Image (cartoon, helix red, strand yellow):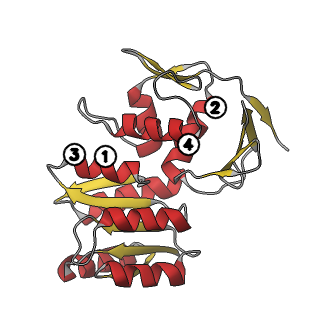
Amino acid sequence: MRKILIVDDDQKTRVLLKTYLEKNQYEVILSHNGESFLAELQQHVDQLSLVILDVMLPDTDGFALCKQVRQRSNVPIIMLTASSDETDRIVGLELGADDYIAKPYSPRELLARIKAILRRTAQEQPAVRYYRFVGFTLDLMERKVIAQDGQLVALTGLDFQLLKYFVEHPGVVLDRSALCEETRGRDAGPFDRSLDVQISRLRLRLNDDGKQPALIKTVRGAGYVFSADVVVSHA
């Protein structure tokens, strides 16, 4: 059974989500503030399938907790944000969140987002294991990226999925709709900057110059292209 850790200071919301998700075969751990969340994270970090963070909490905020989660784990994170505040969404993505959902939302919508993320991050045995490109190796089986010096590259689940899609289509111009559909399971609105934030973050992780990128290049009016040569291998 997939285990989900939720932090939200509203008791009715916590109870509603726990009841709904348990009916859909998820194990749910609840926290009411940052302190209790970190205690539960410490105890269950290696067993968690997903974390849900409310932005507004009585003793801290979801952004600080997101940062601390990323220091310990690559577990997928969904942020619960104010419906009209784009800043919350952008900051959350920059700190390593994998998705966001605006309030008010329905449990059914949240469940759909959870299922989409877990499908994308399912560790199935891949036909191809490694993609190698200019000093990096992407390992599909262990879902990690290793630099030439042997150091692990810190990526969120969403970062990994985006990079995987790029290396699977080197030299192909990928439009925003295709990239958003692949990483979030939905198209981006005309004013949605989340994909741009995610690509900027991925460039940073790969030491790709944001002003003159050599790996992930912007094609104005068309999308993005992964311009490096990619070598595929099974071992």
- x, y percent for residue 73: 55, 65
Label ID, residue 179: none
Is 143 on the left-hand or right-hand side of 83? right
Task: Residue under label 2, please give it.
Answer: 168
Residue furthest out toward the right? 235
Give the numbered dot on residue 90: 1
Is mark 1 in CB contact (under 8 Å) with mark 2?
no
Decide which of tag 3 and tag 2 comes sooner along the chain.
Answer: 3
Horizontally, residue 176 falls left or right of residue 61, namely right
Disc on the earlier residue, 4 or 1 = 1
* Mark identifier at residue 86: 3
Circle 3: residue type:
Glu
Tags 1 and 3 in contact by the CB under 8 Å rule? Answer: yes
Task: Give the number of the mark in front: 3 or 2.
Answer: 3
Q: Nearer the observer, disc 4 or disc 1?
A: 4
Give how far apart the Cα atoms at labels 1 and 3 are: 6 Å
The first of marks 2 and 4 along the sequence is 2
Mark 4 = which residue? 205
Measured as percent of width and height from the top left, residue 3 is found at 49, 75
Q: What element carries label 3?
A: helix
Q: Disc 3 vs disc 4: Cβ atoms closer than 8 Å? A: no
Separation (CA) of disc 1 from disc 2: 26 Å
User: Does 183 sit above or below residue 60?
Assistant: above
- Separation of marks 4 and 1 at Cα, in angstroms: 17 Å
Q: Residue at x 47, y 60 (%)?
A: 76
Q: Estimate how packed mark 4 is, as few (under 14), some (14 to 19) or many (20 or more) residues with alpha carbons within 10 Å.
A: few
Indicate the secondary structure of the residue bearing disc 2. Answer: helix
Q: In which quarter of the image is the C terminus?
A: top right
Which amino acid lies under the numbered mark 2 shown in the image of this protein? Glu
